[in-house]
Image (tube, grey):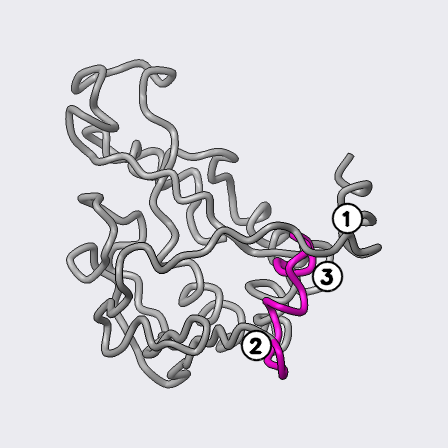
Amino acid sequence: LLLTEDDLDMPDMLGAKAMCSPPPRDTQAQAALWRGIEDGTIDIFNSDHAPYRFDSDGKLKAGPTPTFRAVANGIPGLETRLPILFSEGVVKGRIDLQRFVALTSTNNAKLYGLHPRKGTIAVGADADLALWNPERRVTITNSMLHHNVDYTPFEGLEVQGWPETVISRGEIIIEKNELRAEPGRGHFLMQETSSAWKTREIKSWI
């Protein structure tokens, strides 16, 4: 949605920082993706977060001048995903707040058979909440992120809107940009439903 083929055409192997699948293309492709997000063609907005460090253990494992096929394919995107969608989508008027929540929470829970335990604010749900400051402006830098990667392809991008408190199952796990969760508190969840919504979407992909 933000990167283009120009980000791949950088000197000194810097373009490798934007190498992922599908590859960044042009502004027309970006516009088509935004239309899909706006009109409901695209149901969920996620990142597989496939990061490699920009060093000899990661992107440059095959040396400083590798062939295209020898460069590790993937970029970090997990922590920047929601702020970018909020800033570029909600703040710029492409989508409303309800569509933002559907793309990032509700539709995911429905697709994976975890709704209404997940993906909704209701009695009996798990009380998973992200408390958002819609006015906060943040310039993204790798030094502020929490991944174990030495770069972000969105270095220097200013976004408006940032999560300030995250609650999981009623417990505050992130506050003031600090992780408070204890190791091992995560739970594996089995699919609880086989909804018509989920079946319809899978068939449409096939």
Q: Earlier in the sequence, mark 1 or mark 2?
A: 2
Q: Amino acid at mark 2?
A: Gly
Q: Residue visible at 72% across and 61% down?
A: 40
Which of these two is toward me, 3 or 62?
A: 62
Instruction: From this view, report whether residue 127 is shown above or below residue 200.
Output: below
Q: Amino acid at mark 1?
A: Glu
**From the viewer's perspective, is 204 left or right of 79?**
right
Which of these two is toward me, 120 or 206?
A: 120
Q: Write down the region rendered in magenta.
A: 108-124
Please say whether residue 4 is one of the residues in the magenta stretch: no
Instruction: From this view, report whether residue 77 is shown above or below residue 17.
Output: below
Task: List the residue tagged with mark 1.
Answer: 201
> Do the numbered discs 3 and 1 sit on residues whose CB atoms are within 8 Å?
no
Question: Distance from label 3 to label 1 (Cα)?
Answer: 12 Å
Looking at the rendered image, the disc whose residue lies closer to the viewer, 3 or 1, is 1
Task: List the residue tagged with mark 2.
Answer: 93
Q: Which mark is residue 40?
A: 3
Which of these two is toward me, 93 or 180?
A: 180
Q: Give the quadrant of the C terminus.
A: top right
**From the viewer's perspective, is 162 left or right of 189?**
left
> Do the numbered discs 2 and 3 sit on residues whose CB atoms are within 8 Å?
no
Residue 17 image point, x, y percent: 29, 37
Question: Distance from label 2 to label 3 (Cα)?
Answer: 15 Å
Q: Taken as a whole, is the magenta stretch helix, strand or loop?
A: loop
Looking at the rendered image, the disc whose residue lies closer to the viewer, 2 or 3, is 3
Q: Earlier in the sequence, mark 2 or mark 3?
A: 3
Question: Distance from label 1 to label 2 (Cα)?
Answer: 27 Å
**From the viewer's perspective, is 1 left or right of 156?**
right
